Image (spheres, rainbow, N blue to C red):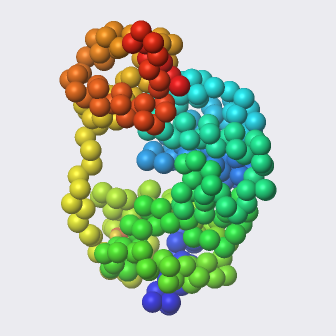
Amino acid sequence: MKTKIEKLKIDLINWYKKNKRDFSWRNTTDPWQILLIETLSQQTQLERANLYFEKFFIEFPSPKSMANSSLKIILKMWSGLGYNNRAKRLFEASKIIEKKGFDQIYPNFEILPGVGPYTKNAILSFAYGEKVLAVDTNTVRICQRYFGLNDTKDFFKENFEHFLLNVDSRDINQAFMDFGSSICKSSNPRCNICPIENSCSKHFSVNKRGKEKFKGSNREVRGKIIKLLINNGQIKNQKLFEEINEDSDKVQKALEGLKKDNLIKFKKNNIIEIN
Ligand code: SF4
């Protein structure tokens, strides 16, 4: 296994050096920029997330500038990305960073809202150059296929040191990201032009859970409600149901979810507004 990991690592980094996507945040060690792009790119393609990053970084060049802003402004800029909870968590994280500073929080970035093991390791690797593997869906998918594994949980625990030996963690982590996005894609992997095809097990595990359809989904209804509240400031309950024009049970469910996530609040006289 060690030899096969060594080969994959070298092949991926060589591929990455010739094919890497050029994003401004790839040339920085500023943890704020890394946190921004990692939050924006969750469940979103990197090219699309990068467009939002450019807008966000102009408006919020530091945690302080975001901490002094408002959830309404942030949600307005976030519009179109979906998963509005991420915006709220980023806002909350900016307030904590503004008080403590990244260096005081280092290395325990998981204390920040919205920062899980992947984002924590991405910050440690890209901003601090730490020898950590930032395992995301690309890393898992490539290794499942290449090594013929159904479950990679123990695999990464047992082998992360082999992946990181004698390489800059930034290179291997970003190589997985780009290779998974353009060659070993989740659907229709491009095995015919893949530089590691000869040694790949080409193991395709079956994902039984289909993706939630966006049209008419809870996610879509939540997005519509947030958009309406951004445009109107506040709105009466009954008017909101009329404007959203979806099944009332779905609207009710979306409203309850948004309230539970502290994204909206219910005020007197059946008024609803952004929290
Ligand atoms: S050969 Fe196909 S499955 Fe294997 S790593 Fe390349 S693209 Fe992925």
The spot of residue 9 in percent (x, y) is 54, 77
Is residue 22 visible in this depiction of the protein?
no
Q: Nearer the viewer, residue 260 or 208?
A: 260
Q: Is residue 194 above or below residue 66?
A: below
Where's ligand 1: which quadrant?
bottom left
Q: Quadrant of residue 195?
A: bottom left
Q: What's the residue at 71%, 52% (across, down)?
A: 31
Q: With respect to residue 269, does 275 lie above or below?
A: below
Residue positioned most to the front: 268
Residue 239, image x and y in percent? 33, 9
**50 horizontally vs 261: left or right:** right
* Res 270 quadrant in image: top left
Horizontal side of residue 180 vs 127, given as left or right: left
User: Residue 120's x, y, as percent?
Assistant: 61, 59
The residue lying at 43 percent from left, 61 percent from top is: 137
* Residue at 48 percent of width and 48 percent of height: 42
Note whether 103 is above or below 154 in the view shown. Answer: above
Instruction: Give the residue at x 27% y 70%.
Output: 204
Is residue 166 depicted above or below 32 in this figure?
Answer: below
- Rendering coords of residue 58 (x, y %): 70, 32
Res. 171 image quadrant: bottom right
Viewer can see residue 258: yes
Q: Quadrant of the N terminus?
A: bottom left
Q: Nearer the viewer, residue 94 or 25?
A: 94
Q: How many marks?
A: 0
